[in-house]
Each structure stands twice: as C-alpha cells, then as structure tokens.
C-alpha cells in the first residue's frame, strides 16, 4: 500500500510540473472591445424599446422553423442524443466553440446521471433521492439543449442560404440577449469568443429559475444535506478526459471544481474557465478532441477508464475492505460498476416551460471581463481522491448497517 501511495504522490507531482510547462503555451482568448461596446448599446436599446415578438413569417421561414423544431425534438431524447448532436455541429463548424464546450460538459452530465445507479450511490442514497437528482440533471440538460440547439442550427441555415436569419430566434423563444452577439458573429466569424461567452451566460440564466430555483428541485435536491456534500456525488467536478497519441487509454483528466452549483455567477465563471481549458492550451485541445472523436458517449465512466470501471455489475455485495487505492484497483478486486445511461434511465418526454425572457437588465455584461486562466487544471488526482472518499463513506455505512 505504501508503494502505491508513493507512486500516486509522484504522479501528482509529475502532473503539476507538466501543467507548468503547458501554461507557457497558454493562448489567451481575446475580443474587440469596440464590438463589445457596440453590443452594449444594442442591448440597452432593446431594453428601452422592447418590440413585440414577430408572429408572422414567410413560407420559407416557416419551413425553416419547423425543420429546426423537428431536429431539436429528435435529438432531445436523452443525454446521449444531445451530447452527440453538439459534437456533430462542432465537427461541421469548428468556429462554434460553444458546441464543443457543451458536448464535453454534457458528457459530464451523463456520467453524473449514471453514477446515481452505479457502484457507490445506491449504497448511500435511497431510490427516491437518486431519482430526484436525476430529474434535476435531466431537466437542466434538456432545457439547455432545447434553447441552444435551435440557435446552432439557425446559424447553419444562415450559412446554407448565405443570409442572416437571426430574426427567427424569436420563433424559438430565445432570449433577446443573444441576438446582437449572433449578428456580430455572422458578420465576423473570428469573433467566436464573444458569442461563446454570451451563450454560457444565456444558458446558465436560462436554467436559473427553471431548475436551480425551481421549488421541487430546490427542496428535494439542492437544499438537501446529501447534495451540499457534493464531493460524495461528484457533481462538483467537471472533467475532460484526454487521449494522448503515445498512450491513448491511460486515464488523464483536466477540468475544474464547482464549489457552489446553486450560485449563478460561479456557474458562469466556471463555464468561462472551462472554455479556456478547451481552447487556450493546444496540447490539451488535441488530447481532448482525440478522446471525444474516438470514444462515443455512453454515459458510462468506462468510456475514459476501462481499467477502473465496468459496465457489468460486480458480484461482491458488501464493502468491508477498499477496492481502490489511489487511481488503481487493488489486486483481485472487481472493477467499479458504471452502467450505460440508456440501460438504467428511461427517456423523459421534454415539456416546454414558461417562455419568460431572463434578460431584464445589463448586469450580465460584467461577465465579459478578461478571463483569468485556472491556477491548476489537473484533475486526475482530485477525481481519484473523490472516489476514495466516497468508497470510505460506503464502507462506513456498511459497518453501521451491520451494527
């Protein structure tokens, strides 16, 4: 055991020094401040002179709207279909940075959903609590997709027809906040930083009242003690697996920790930092895209670490000794159960909610200040520490139950 812990410590040290080297390659995100001032004026004008939503569209426009609505419905079946749909859009349009960020964050949403029926959490939480947590995660995932995916498809339609179609955003009840950013991006496709940050702001505000402040989720999930101890649920970790060319299946993770999921400002700031993780470090970007393109998303953590996880349920029914030390299974121990999402959760029909626009003032413009790179991005050690902690919690629960 001592040797394993020593090797884990050395690995953490190597990861830190590797990060210091990669930090030298950091390419900061930038944007034209003049453009931002122009958007600020447009948004101010929108608030001062609100226009009624356009209800009449041409026949061609109606066909475009119907086609996008149908594609959105088809791909909003579950976390698997949404995650893949984001990736396909990004493959077709590499300047739509938000689509790739959404793909990777959505993978995390799927892993969190399957954890609820995986190795550890069923031993700590009853089914009612796990179901409530799943419904919250599913609602956030589906709501964001329902709002954002039509925007991405509308951009593609604009490209296809070589015509600005963003006046059609009203047909999808998209916040008026994003239209000036899309129009700027349409005129200058190199302004991908501003549209990405705008979409991060928009989507987090979009789920604020509908999910985070929704009484049924707030009372049953977010205000509960078990959710406040987020490290046990691993819901506070957003990880991006990497496949390097020389060692494609060794578990290497980068990412960030969300300290308070309930805080809107923190979710937005973490989203911005995750954006830098993906697009400001060339080596990270290549390794993460290697993973995303080589490994289809199933919701199982086997996707990024088959040495530690299995899609088959283990035969051992009790936890008297640890299975994992650091990032490795103990000799002879069975892998941790991590099922595929479609095997354990049924599709939840999407229900549209209120079309109220969250955009009522200019306070969100504060989020366009310069993004500071994270102090550390290495998450392999932190993730394994969280696994170790939750396993110890299961062992403690097992001992109490026996007593």
Image: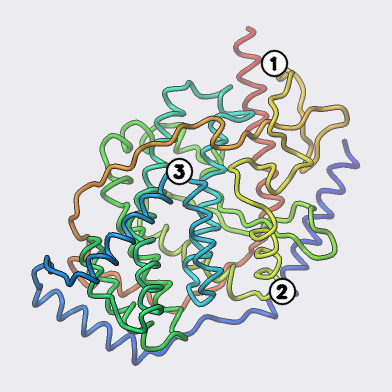
Please tell me whether mark 2 sits on a helix, a strand or a loop.
helix
Tell me if residue 186 comes above or below residue 78 in the rendering.
below
Of the two numbered discs 3 and 2 in the rendering, the one whose residue sits closer to the viewer: 3
Q: Check disc 1: other Cα within 10 Å, few if <14, some if 14-19, many if 20+.
A: few
Q: Nearer the viewer, residue 225 or 95?
A: 95
> Among all residues in the image, which is located at the extreme top?
403
Q: Are marks 1 and 3 in contact (CB under 8 Å)?
A: no
Task: Where is residue 58? Give x, y as percent.
Answer: 17, 72
User: Which residue is the site of mark 3?
Assistant: 78
Q: Quadrant of the N terminus?
A: top right
Task: Where is residue 30? Give x, y as percent.
Answer: 48, 84
Q: Is residue 59 left or right of residue 271?
A: left
User: Which residue is the site of mark 1?
Assistant: 317
Q: What distance separates the C-alpha of mark 3 from that of mark 2?
A: 36 Å
Q: Check disc 3: other Cα within 10 Å, few if <14, some if 14-19, many if 20+.
A: many
Q: Quadrant of the C terminus?
A: top right
User: Which residue is the site of mark 2?
Assistant: 22
Whether residue 144 is visible to the viewer of this picture, yes or no, is: no
| Label 3 vs 2, first from the N-terminus | 2
Task: Where is residue 136? Give x, y as percent.
Answer: 38, 39
Q: Nearer the viewer, residue 134 or 220?
A: 134
Task: Where is residue 240? Give x, y as percent.
Answer: 62, 57
Q: Are marks 3 and 2 in contact (CB under 8 Å)?
A: no
| Label 1 vs 2, first from the N-terminus | 2
């Amino acid at each position: 055991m001592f040797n394993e812990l020593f090797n884990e410590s050395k690995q953490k040290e190597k990861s830190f020094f590797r990060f210091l080297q990669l930090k030298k390659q950091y390419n900061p995100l930038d944007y034209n401040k003049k453009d931002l001032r122009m958007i600020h004026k447009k948004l101010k004008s929108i608030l001062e002179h609100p226009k009624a939503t356009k209800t009449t569209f041409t026949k061609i426009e109606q066909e475009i709207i119907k086609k996008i609505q149908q594609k959105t419905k088809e791909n909003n079946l579950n976390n698997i279909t949404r995650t893949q749909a984001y990736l396909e859009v990004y493959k077709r349009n590499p300047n739509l940075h938000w689509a790739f960020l959404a793909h990777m964050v959505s993978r995390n949403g799927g892993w969190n959903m399957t954890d609820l029926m995986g190795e550890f959490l069923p031993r700590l939480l009853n089914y009612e609590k796990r179901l409530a947590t799943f419904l919250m995660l599913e609602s956030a995932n589906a709501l964001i997709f329902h709002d954002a995916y039509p925007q991405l498809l509308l951009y593609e339609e604009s490209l296809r027809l070589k015509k600005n179609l963003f006046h059609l955003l009203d047909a999808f009840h998209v916040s008026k906040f994003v239209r000036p950013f899309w129009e700027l991006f349409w005129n200058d496709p190199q302004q991908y930083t501003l549209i990405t940050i705008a979409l991060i702001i928009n989507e987090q505000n979009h789920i604020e009242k509908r999910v985070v402040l929704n009484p049924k989720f707030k009372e049953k999930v977010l205000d509960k003690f078990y959710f406040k101890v987020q490290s046990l649920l691993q819901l506070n970790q957003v990880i991006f697996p990497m496949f390097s060319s020389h060692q494609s299946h060794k578990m290497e993770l980068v990412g960030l920790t969300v300290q308070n999921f309930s805080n809107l400002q923190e979710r937005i700031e973490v989203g911005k930092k995750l954006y830098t993780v993906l697009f400001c470090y060339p080596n990270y970007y290549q390794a993460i895209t290697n993973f995303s393109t080589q490994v289809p998303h199933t919701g199982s953590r086997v996707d990024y670490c088959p040495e530690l996880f299995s899609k088959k349920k283990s035969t051992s029914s009790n936890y008297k000794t640890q299975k994992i030390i650091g990032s490795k299974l103990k000799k002879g121990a069975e892998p941790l159960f991590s099922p595929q999402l479609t095997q354990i959760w049924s599709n939840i029909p999407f229900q549209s909610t209120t079309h109220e626009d969250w955009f009522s003032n200019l306070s969100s413009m504060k989020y366009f200040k310069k993004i500071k790179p994270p102090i550390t991005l290495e998450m392999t050690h932190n993730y394994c520490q969280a696994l170790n902690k939750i396993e110890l919690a299961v062992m403690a629960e097992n001992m109490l139950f026996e007593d």
